[in-house]
Amino acid sequence: VSAGGKYGFIDKTGKLAVPARYEYVYGFSEGVALVRVDKKWEYIDRSGKEITAAEYDGGYSFTADGLALVHKDGKWGYIDKSGKVVVPLEYERGMSFSEGLAAVKQGGRWGYIDAAGKEVAAARYQSAGSFSEGLASVRSGGKYGYIDAAGKEVAAPAYDHGMDYS
C-alpha cells in the first residue's frame, strides 16, 4: 500500500501489517520482502523486522533455494534468509538460483555455482541461462548449447538460438 508517497504492507484481512515508511517495495517471496530506505535496499520479514541493514545497491527476491542475489559497490553475491552472506559479493554479475545452481560472471565470462558457492561450471561462456528441467542454455563462439547440473555439455554450442538471460 502507498500513503504519503511511502510504501508499506497490509495483511490478508486488509489490516496494516508493516507501516508505509519505504521509498519502494517488492512483494514478499519466501516470507521476505526487498524494500528501499534512503536509496539503499534491505530485506524485511512479514512483521517489518529488518533482516539486513539498508546497505545494498540492489537485490532480487528469495528463491525456493533460500537465497537472494544482492549487489553492492559493483559486486554481486548471495545471502540467506537470516541476512548472512553465504556466497561472497565477488562476482561481476549474477543470476538468481534455479534448481540449486546460479550463473555468475567473472572475467567477462559466465559459469555456474552451487548454493555453497562451489564452482560447477567454469566461467567460460559468453552468456548463460537459468536451469530448467535439469539443463541450462549457454553461448560460446556465438552459438548455443546446453549443460547439465554437473556442468557437462550435453549439447555442444552449435545452435543459432538458445535461452539465455545474462
Image: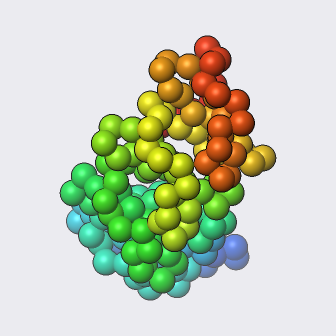
Position of 38 relative to 46 (above/below): above
Judge by depth and name the residue closer to the eye, 13 or 28: 28
The answer, for residue 127, to whether it is visible in the render is yes
Q: Residue at x 29, y 72 (%)?
A: 54
Q: Is residue 115 left or right of residue 145?
A: left
Q: Is residue 111 left or right of residue 101?
A: left
Position of 123 relative to 89 (above/below): above
Q: Is residue 99 left or right of residue 76?
A: right
Q: What x and y, as percent, mark residue 94?
A: 43, 50
The answer, for residue 3, to whether it is visible in the render is no
Residue 27's image quarter?
bottom right
Q: What x and y, as percent, mark residue 153?
A: 65, 38
Judge by depth and name the residue closer to the eye, 4 or 151: 151
Q: Residue at x 52, y 84 (%)?
A: 47
Q: Residue at x 44, y 74 (%)?
A: 86
Q: Is residue 41 left or right of residue 116?
A: left
Judge by depth and name the residue closer to the eye, 9 or 89: 89
According to the image, what is the colour scheme of the structure? Answer: rainbow
Q: Residue at x 33, y 63 (%)?
A: 89
Q: What x and y, as percent, mark residue 16?
A: 54, 78
Position of 145 relative to 83 (above/below): above
Q: How many marks?
A: 0
